[in-house]
Image (cartoon, rainbow, N blue to C red):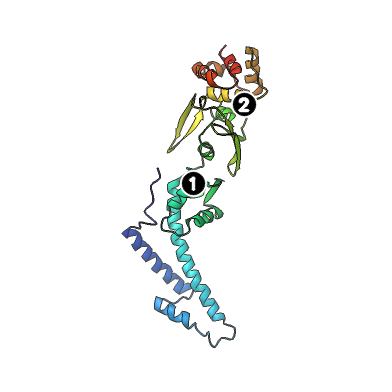
């Protein structure tokens, strides 16, 4: 579970001191280089009586002063916003999160929904689908996990079929679509991370041969090699395995998997799948 950062609604005493010093430094910088008044009273006075404003024929002095003053406040407010934003985004890491979670990271900011749109527009977050985002790795230092994204884009789901077989190194061909199984209706998503395709599976067959793989500080659901093969056979309309020769042709010619790998697999998973899964006759041929 994500921890809410200290920036935002609960700024520490150290944070307040830091921001105060930062503001004074920036103010001194812009006073020296941009030509702003040094104090708040001078700002108010200068604003009401811009230098040479009355005597100026075209009002250029007043316009320049307003531009500099507005830029100063814009710079300071956006620098502060960038500080709290960058800290919060790093805490998210590579975990896909919803709009509401991103909004909760900035309790002290108004119009949080607009901030989410701003973050996306400026490349800090990447939209996977409506209401679901992942942080740009340029700001977290963590690579995006396509497997983790697959679990979140359409849940509950697990990675399977060719994607899982390729993940285990059982097939040589590159897989360009991220394939998963879900208890929901079949659906697909075209995202900046690639194409994600989900096929329906019954609730009874869903948990068979599914495991959680941990990678550092995150984990994702993926089918075991046995379950991935079952799902692939079940969702290949033209595949009908009746004899051992059909199995050999399918594995070695169609998906280019070494048949020796089949003999290393857990036959119990095939047996459990046959009881509740689709195309049980073809899967049961693997057991012969």
Residue, x 56% and y 55% (percent of image)?
A: 121
Residue 280: quarter of image: top right
Residue 107 in the image: state x and y as whole percent. Answer: 41, 55
Compared to 241, does 193 lie above or below?
below
Image quarter of the N terminus? top left
Residue 267 in the image: state x and y as whole percent. Answer: 51, 16
User: Rounded to the nearest whole Å, what is the CA distance between mark 1 and mark 2?
Assistant: 31 Å
Compared to 150, does 113 lie above or below?
below
Compared to 216, does 280 lie above or below?
above
Residue, x 43% and y 81% (percent of image)?
A: 45
* Residue 6 visible in the displayed image: yes
Horizontal side of residue 6 vs 204, given as left or right: left
Sequence-wise first label, 1 or 2: 1
Q: Residue furthest right?
A: 238
Q: Residue furthest bottom?
A: 55
Q: Nearer the viewer, residue 137 or 230?
A: 230
* Residue 39 visible in the displayed image: no
For the residue carrying disc 2, how many other residues have a C-alpha within 10 Å: few (<14), some (14-19), or many (20+)? some
Residue 58 in the image: state x and y as whole percent. Answer: 59, 83
Q: Secondary structure at mark 2?
A: loop
For the residues labelled 1 and 2, say whether their Cβ atoms are less than 8 Å apart.
no
Q: Secondary structure at mark 1?
A: strand
Q: Which residue is mark 2?
A: 235
Residue 245 in the image: state x and y as whole percent. Answer: 65, 13
Image quarter of the C terminus? top right
Residue, x 64% and y 19% (percent of image)?
A: 250
Residue, x 54% and y 77% (percent of image)?
A: 64
Residue 44: quarter of image: bottom left
Q: Which label number is shown at residue 89?
A: none
For the residue carrying disc 1, how many other residues have a C-alpha within 10 Å: few (<14), some (14-19), or many (20+)? some
Q: Which residue is mark 1?
A: 98
């Amino acid at each position: 579970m994500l921890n809410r950062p200290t920036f935002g609604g609960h700024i520490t005493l150290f944070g307040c001191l830091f921001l105060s010093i930062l503001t004074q430094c920036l103010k001194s910088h812009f006073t020296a280089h941009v030509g702003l008044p040094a104090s708040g009273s001078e700002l108010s006075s200068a604003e009401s009586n811009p230098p040479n404003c009355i005597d100026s024929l075209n009002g250029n002095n007043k316009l320049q002063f307003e531009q500099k003053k507005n830029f100063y406040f814009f710079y300071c407010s956006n620098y502060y916003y960038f500080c709290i934003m960058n800290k919060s985004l790093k805490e998210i890491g590579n975990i896909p999160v919803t709009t509401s979670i991103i909004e909760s990271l900035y309790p002290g900011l108004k119009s949080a929904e607009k901030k989410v749109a701003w973050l996306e527009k400026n490349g800090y977050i990447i939209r996977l689908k409506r209401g679901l985002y992942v942080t740009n790795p340029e700001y977290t230092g963590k690579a995006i996990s396509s497997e983790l994204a697959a679990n979140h884009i359409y849940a509950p789901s697990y990675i399977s079929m060719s994607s899982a077989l390729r993940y285990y190194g059982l097939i040589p061909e590159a897989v360009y679509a991220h394939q998963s199984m879900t208890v929901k209706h079949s659906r697909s998503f075209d995202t900046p991370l690639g194409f994600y395709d989900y096929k329906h599976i019954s609730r009874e067959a869903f948990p068979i041969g599914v495991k959680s793989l941990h990678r550092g500080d995150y984990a994702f659901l993926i089918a075991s090699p046995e379950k991935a093969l079952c799902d692939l056979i079940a969702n290949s309309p033209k595949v009908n395995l009746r004899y051992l020769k059909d199995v050999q042709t399918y594995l070695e010619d169609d998906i280019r998997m070494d048949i020796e790998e089949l003999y290393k697999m857990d036959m119990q998973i095939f047996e459990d799948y046959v009881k509740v899964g689709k195309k049980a006759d073809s899967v049961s041929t693997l057991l012969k």
